[in-house]
Image (spheres, rainbow, N blue to C red):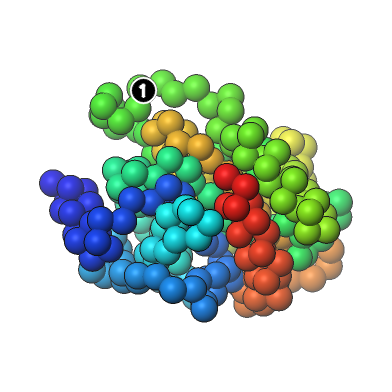
């Protein structure tokens, strides 16, 4: 089976590394692993992985240890708007679960739906709204992995949220909390869609994270979600949206983000 091949291959390349945590890096956060010592495996070598086609996403798994924890980092994720199936997008979560990971930290860049958040802010995801028009669990259920109708009342682990706030307080970072709405993209929203999302109860909007969170929850993994606010969503201010702006804010904020994630992992 493809997933068993990939598990065996990664075990061989990493000398039997058993990850505790999977960290998924979003747009502009790809330099997280710079300066760290570990093992890199390009996606092109892993059975079932597809190339990452988005600027700012490197396309490799990185394995390292820190604070007595083994961490696997996805440098770039698979998006629905790239034409990937939900199966492809969520395959890495299943793979890392099979390798031993019990916790997943999902990060992304997202647009703020009003001015209570500003570009450069970090926001913990307390809940999400799935507006992708599909669900990664559609199809035959693998009962050995998770339930047919998984409960979704606590996708984002309260305990990890508390730890993240403690870490942020210690570092003097103003860490916000809010609801993430996921659309398919790749076009950004219209101003009217942004108004609708706000009325629905979302605080930020992005094009990822939710499929991975649904699968991780199904697999009984603990999930922590962190959004880097990269821009005001369409219509919130007069400015136009661009992917380069999203990447730029990612770069500017990556130091703060990296230190925060390290501190949170230290507390896990
Ligand atoms: N909308 C959707 N996805 C995004 C945005 C946005 O404004 N910013 C970063 N990802």
Q: Give the image location of residue 210, x and y in percent.
A: 52, 44
Q: Is residue 128 above or below residue 257?
A: above
> Viewer-proximal residue, 184 or 154?
154
Residue 121 seen from this side: yes
Residue 186 seen from this side: no
Q: Is residue 147 above or below residue 72?
A: above
Query: Which residue reaches farthest left?
Result: 1
Residue drawn where x is 26% and y is 27% of the image: 144
Which image quarter: residue 233?
bottom right
> Viewer-proximal residue, 192 or 33?
33
Q: Give the image location of residue 217, x and y in percent.
A: 47, 33
Query: Which residue reaches farthest front?
Result: 68
> Viewer-proximal residue, 65 or 116?
65
Question: Which residue is disc 1 drawn over?
Answer: 147
State the SS at label 1.
loop
Q: Give the image location of residue 236, x and y in percent.
A: 82, 58
Residue drawn where x is 68% and y is 47% of the image: 164
Which image quarter: residue 261?
bottom right
């Amino acid at each position: 089976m493809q997933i068993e091949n990939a598990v065996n291959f990664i075990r061989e390349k990493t000398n039997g590394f058993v990850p505790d945590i999977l960290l998924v890096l979003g747009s502009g956060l790809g330099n997280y692993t710079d300066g760290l010592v570990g093992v890199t495996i390009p996606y092109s070598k892993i059975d079932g992985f597809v190339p990452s086609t988005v600027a700012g996403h490197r396309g490799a798994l990185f394995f390292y240890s820190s604070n007595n924890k083994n961490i696997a980092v996805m440098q770039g994720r698979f998006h629905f708007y790239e034409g990937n199936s939900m199966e492809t997008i969520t395959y890495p979560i299943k793979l890392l679960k099979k390798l031993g990971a019990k916790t997943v930290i999902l990060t992304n860049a997202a647009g703020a739906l009003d001015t209570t958040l500003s570009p450069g802010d970090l926001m913990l995801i307390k809940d999400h709204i799935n507006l992708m028009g599909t669900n990664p669990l559609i199809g035959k259920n693998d009962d050995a992995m998770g339930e047919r109708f998984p409960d979704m009342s606590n996708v984002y682990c309260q305990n990890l949220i508390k730890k993240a706030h403690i870490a942020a307080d210690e570092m003097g970072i103003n860490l916000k909390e809010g609801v993430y709405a996921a659309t398919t993209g790749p076009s950004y929203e219209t101003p009217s869609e942004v108004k609708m999302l706000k009325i629905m109860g979302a605080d930020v909007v992005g094009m990822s994270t939710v499929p991975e969170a649904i699968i991780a929850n199904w697999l009984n993994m603990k999930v922590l979600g962190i959004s880097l606010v990269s821009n005001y969503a369409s219509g919130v201010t007069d400015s136009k949206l661009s992917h380069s702006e999203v990447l730029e804010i990612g770069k500017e904020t990556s130091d703060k983000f990296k230190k925060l994630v390290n501190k949170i992992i230290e507390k896990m």
